[in-house]
Amino acid sequence: MDDLPRPSPGRRRRAWRGRYLTMKDNVRIVLVEITHPGNIGAAARAMKNMGLSQLYLVRPQGFPSAEATARAAGADDLLARAMVCDDLDEALTGCGLVFGASARARKISWPQLDPRAAAARVASVGEKAAVVFGREHAGLTNEELDRCTHLLTIPTVPEFSSLNVAAAVQVVSYELRMATAPPAAAADQARLATAEQRERFYQHLEQVLLDLEFLDPANPKHLMRRLRRLFNRVELDENEVHILRGILTAVARKAS
Amino acid sequence: MDDLPRPSPGRRRRAWRGRYLTMKDNVRIVLVEITHPGNIGAAARAMKNMGLSQLYLVRPQGFPSAEATARAAGADDLLARAMVCDDLDEALTGCGLVFGASARARKISWPQLDPRAAAARVASVGEKAAVVFGREHAGLTNEELDRCTHLLTIPTVPEFSSLNVAAAVQVVSYELRMATAPPAAAADQARLATAEQRERFYQHLEQVLLDLEFLDPANPKHLMRRLRRLFNRVELDENEVHILRGILTAVARKAS
């Protein structure tokens, strides 16, 4: 599968493409001693959804496994290419920025970022970076965190702060994508109605409502202003104006 | 468990608290015809991590179940209080804003928001809101989306756009918390060193490096400027300055 944005002549588009390539190839997700293979699969799926591909597993238990593949739900290519490492240092080779995920605030002062700030840092630096997640119940050890340039903490309620590890990978991967992905292509939407089209619609509406004796001919403006506010707010497209004027024409025919 | 922020005299704090209460009580997560109980449990955990509590289940399969409870990992209170509904209309009663999660861009024009924009909308309106997630493989039907005021689409790579439903709940719950939670309490960190403390450290460092004949006495400034840049960048705290000056003192004693 090719998940690069299609080439486009726009300069802005090319700039985004460069950042996107950087993210896909340069950011690795490192999982340390994960014991539930389902979590590894779910993490791979989360990564692939967000355009990441570099999965590193330090001493995983029960991997590869059918459960990991099932939970990957189509991201099994990431599992097949995952780098299985004996220790964390091996998984971090070549990485400049290293973020260690931790729910706990540490006593010792430590540069601590939330996922949004961490993703912004990764996007602006453009070098190899790693985000390291620890064991399901125990997280990362202090010795492992000592290898990290930054602590990454996902904001939670204080009383229930332990995210599932794949859920944490999902949040971080999402923020990495938000920080670097090309702007979403505009949906195949109808063109907005222009000011003139809207004015003709309002005149049409006012005339029909007068014919229906719904509006007070001496003072039609108050209600019309409310109706204008309503229809302006919905940002009518051209098709919708056609539909509404069709309805008005049908009403006028019936009422005459 | 009480996950309200503790009262504080600060006015800003109180304002945040109000928004936080609003979010917790006013935002419901609605899951439609989920077939894997594990996903319901994982969604409850994700919600509770982020301070949400209102879970609505439309025609869930195999609920309650041990698997849901296991994956909830301590958020079983949300499962116990979940509202099980026969249809979507029942689950949406009282809701102003209704966001329907959808991976697909629709032909018909529809107000489509990403999770960040949706969370900002929820936070600014402060009325009852719902975010609706559909079946694992089929999502929401068009009839169900017709009940939504907005489409919510989580940005993904185009080729692999289907998130696990609990992962999608995690991303949305995270953005809701980012939009409304009180700023994280500052970690129990040492105070930053002041400008004077830094200057005394640099003078101490320069003197020791001159004594070591490491600096050129005729032109010590170039290297000192590099060292200043390094130590300024790390935003030394008071304890760290004490430690570094202790090292300098020990070096000077040994070298004299």
Image (cartoon, coloured by chain):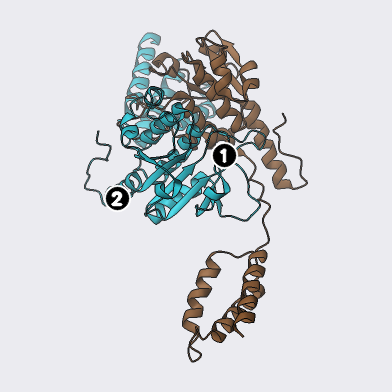
Chain colours: A cyan, B brown
* Residue A201, position as x, y percentages in the image: 38, 27
**Is residue B92 at least partly visible in the picture?**
no
In the picture, measured across the screen, residue A161 lies left or right of residue A41, that is right
Asked whether A103 or B4 is in front, the reply is A103
Quarter of the image with the N terminus of chain A in it:
top left
- Identify whether A16 is placed above or below B47: below
Residue annotated with mark 2: A18
Q: What percent of the width, then of the height, locates residue B67?
A: 54, 16
On the question of residue A166 being in view, the answer is: yes
Which residue is tagged 1? B179
Please give left or right for residue A50 compared with residue B166 in the image.
left
Q: Nearer the viewer's eye, disc 2 or disc 1? A: 2
From the viewer's side, name the closer residue of B47 and B151.
B47
Q: Where, by quadrant of the figure, is residue A87 drawn? A: top left
* A188 on left or right of B84: left
- Which amino acid type corresponds to the residue marked 1 in the rendered image? Ala
- Marks 2/1: CA distance? 30 Å
What residue sits 78% from the left and 46% below the top?
B9
Q: Residue at x 67, y 41 (%)?
A: B16
Q: Tag 1, which secondary structure? A: helix
